[in-house]
Structure formats: structure tokens, C-alpha cells
Amino acid sequence: MLAPRVAAPVAEHMTPHDLVTYFRCPYEMELVRANHARTVTGGPGVVRTPADVVPLRQSPMFAPPMGHVVVTEGRLDLDDRDVLVYEDEGEDDLPVLFPPERVRLDPRFRNGGRTLVDRELGIAGRPDLIVQRADGSLVPVEYKETHLFVGYHEAHGRLFDTVQVVAECRLVEAAFGRRVPYGVVLYGDEAGGGLHEGWVRIPYGDAEKGWLRAALVQVRDDSVRAPVPHERNCAGCEPNAEGQCRFAAARYEGPHHRAAFAATPRA
Ligand code: SF4
């Protein structure tokens, strides 16, 4: 006799931004997602963190591989044969890297279709830009207005960018069905007049792919999603601005606090 069919459980939906937030504070991720659900669906926005949760000193997510990240000062090394094939058209402040004749946006991923979806891993999101390089490979580019890492930021902030970019590499690979050798974080240093422009190249190989799969399992299996109170986390935490977290270690200082804090060289 045939066994009855049992539908596979649907994996909890995740975005690169969720992973970054979890890497900072799992409870913040829960609050942000619940707020978003309330805004979008009008539902209650469930937070799974139990009332008697014990705060943690650091997020349980293990760090992504960092051994082959390459930091370069100056302008991005674009080739004359590179073209732009994707742009998050919902973002207003992205840099213009290509002349019009080298902008060939893929029509599959424009307007309502610009969110990239990976059904296998259950993730979705939108990189800022995707560049098709001369060899046909694709490279997601995440743009930041702050300057290239120095001092404290060098050791810490790059981890968060790596989490985001590895997830975006996977999304590009899944959505376009093309090879993605690495992703880029591009620093525009708008406030500094271009003084510290630069870019970080984050490889996307077997180690990073394995890390991403394991990280998604870890986040989905975490039934606690504990708070990680720390000035660095809490002063830029938007749910904290709404008075939603009783564990906060600092007052909310505004959305730019994290970038400013992270960019301050450690004495
Ligand atoms: S205020 Fe701090 S502890 Fe509370 S959710 Fe935000 S980052 Fe986490």
C-alpha cells in the first residue's frame, strides 16, 4: 500500500537583511519582522521570543568565512566590456557606474519582478546592482555611502557586509542561473568627498555556500531569538525607537548611528 503523501514543511522565508539583523541581535530580527507583518498584512505580527528569555552577550550565528576577502582603495575596477544587467529601481541614491550604452537591464527583473527569489533555500531580496563582467559571470554590488573601513570598522563591520553579500550572491546565482564568483561592497564616501572610496571583494565559493546553508538552518531552528543588548546594537535599532525592547542597553540615536559608530576608528 502506498504511504500517504505528506507535504514538505515550508521553510520560513528569509532575506539577506534578516540574516544581517540576526547576526547583530536575533530579537531585533523578530521585532522587525513582526512590525513588517503588521504593516503589510494587518495581522498581529507574532514574536517567538519567550517572555522569560535570557539575553545573550553575542549573537549565536557563527561568522562567515573571511579569509579571502580583499579590500581595495579607490574606484571599482570596471572593464570596458562590463555591463549593468540589474538595478534596484526602488533605490534613489545608487551611483551611476556605467554610460547609457552599457546599461542592459534584464527585463525579467524590472519593476514588479525586481525581487530575486531562491525557492530552494527560501530566500528573497534585492541587491543594489548586478554587473555582468567581461567573462560572462555576474557580480552583485552593494552600495554604501560611508567610507571604506578603517580601524574598528575594519575588524567588525566587514562581517555584516559579508553576511549580506554572500546571501545576495546566492540569490543572483539562483535567479539568473549564472556563475557568481564573488560579490562587492562599494563604498562611495559621500560625506568625505570621495576621500575614502573603495570596495571589498567577497568570494562566493564552497566555503561561503556551506556557511549560508548552515546559517539558514541555524536561524530557522532557533526558537528563542534572544536579545543581544549592546550600545553598538541598540542605538541603531528601530524597534528600540518605538520602545519595543525592554532589554535595550542604549537609547535610540537614529538610523545612521550604526554606520557612524562603526566607522569611528578605535583608539
Ligand atoms: S534594543 Fe538592543 S537588545 Fe533590544 S532588540 Fe534592539 S538591538 Fe536587540
Image: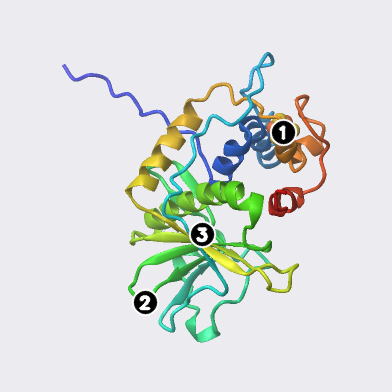
Side of 199 where 258 appears, left or right: right
Quarter holding the N terminus is top left
Q: Nearer the viewer, residue 174 or 255?
A: 255
Query: Residue under circle 1?
Result: 230
The residue carrying mark 1 has its beta carbon less than 8 Å from ligand 1: yes
Which of the two discs, 1 and 3, labels the residue nearer the N terminus? 3
Q: Residues within 10 Å of mark 1 (few under 14, many from 20)?
A: some
| Foreground tag (1 vs 3) | 1
Measuring from the top left, give residue 59's x and y in whole percent.
58, 31
| Foreground tag (2 vs 1) | 1
Residue pushed farthest front? 267
Amino acid carrying mark 1 in the image:
His
Which quadrant of the view contains residue 27? Answer: top right
Query: Residue under circle 3?
Result: 113
| Foreground tag (3 vs 2) | 2
Q: Secondary structure at mark 1?
A: loop
The residue sitting at 44% across, 53% down in the picture is 171
Q: Secondary structure at mark 2?
A: loop
**Is 69 situated above or below 41?**
below
